[in-house]
Amino acid sequence: MKLIFIYGPPATGKLTVAKELAKLTKYKIFHNHLTVDLLGSVFKFGTKTFFDLSDRFRMEIFEAAAKENIDGLIFTFCYAYPEDDEFVKNVKKRVEKYGGKIDFVQLFCEKSELKRRVKGASRENFDKIKTKKGLDATLKKWDLFTPIPFVESLRIDNTNISAKQVAKKIKMHYKL
């Protein structure tokens, strides 16, 4: 299995890029908010129980997809340095256990662009941050701009390029 692990701050366009990449590759999308919204309906975001269950559900899905040798999976994630290092290491371990490979992509853009995008209509379908105030609080609480230090990531500043162009860059870079 090939896992494309797209990460970056809220409103960088991770899901939008994932959708465009899925069109080009026919890979399936495992969007971060599928588990966030599921668990958020029962547990408060940020609690130990919330994060423990989220990690467990995601790990089971990664391992099952790798075991089943799914052709390709695109995962979107809001990586916080260094809090999420163990999660990323565990994803690698689960996928590689079955011969899978992970390609990492870090999306980032100017903060002024994040503040513009955070109010976009595409964010309405999920329990995502939708205000500048919420975005500011999140960016203050966590380091969401540092690349994952122990993996190689394709880093793309998508401030001024479309999701379709970003998807094409990813496809070309990783020869998908």
Image (cartoon, helix red, strand yellow):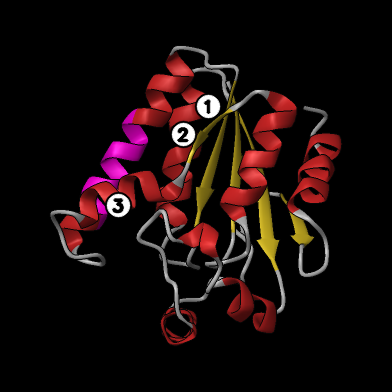
Q: Which residues are magenta?
A: 51-60
Q: Secondary structure at mark 1?
A: helix
The Cα atoms of the two marked residues, 3 and 2, are separated by 25 Å
Q: Nearer the viewer, mark 3 or mark 2?
A: 3
Location of residue 63 by image quarter: top left
Image quadrant containing the C terminus = top right
Residue type at numbered disc 3: Asp
Q: Secondary structure at mark 3?
A: helix
- Residue 128 appears left or right of 163: left
Q: Residue furthest top?
A: 68
User: Which residue is labeled 1 in the image?
Assistant: 96
The Cα atoms of the two marked residues, 1 and 2, are separated by 5 Å
Residue 151 in sight here: no
User: Which residue is labeled 2 in the image?
Assistant: 93
Q: Decide: marks 1, 2 in contact (CB < 8 A)?
A: yes
Q: Which mark is drawn over residue 37?
A: 3
Asked whether 124 falls inside the magenta stretch, the response is no
Q: Residue 142: horizontal and vertical position, in percent?
A: 45, 77
Q: Nearer the viewer, mark 1 or mark 3?
A: 3
Residue type at numbered disc 2: Lys
Q: Residue at x 53, y 74 (%)?
A: 119
Q: Secondary structure at mark 2?
A: helix
Q: Residue furthest front?
A: 121
Answer with mark 3 or mark 2, whichever residue precedes in sequence: 3
Asked whether 53 falls inside the magenta stretch, the response is yes
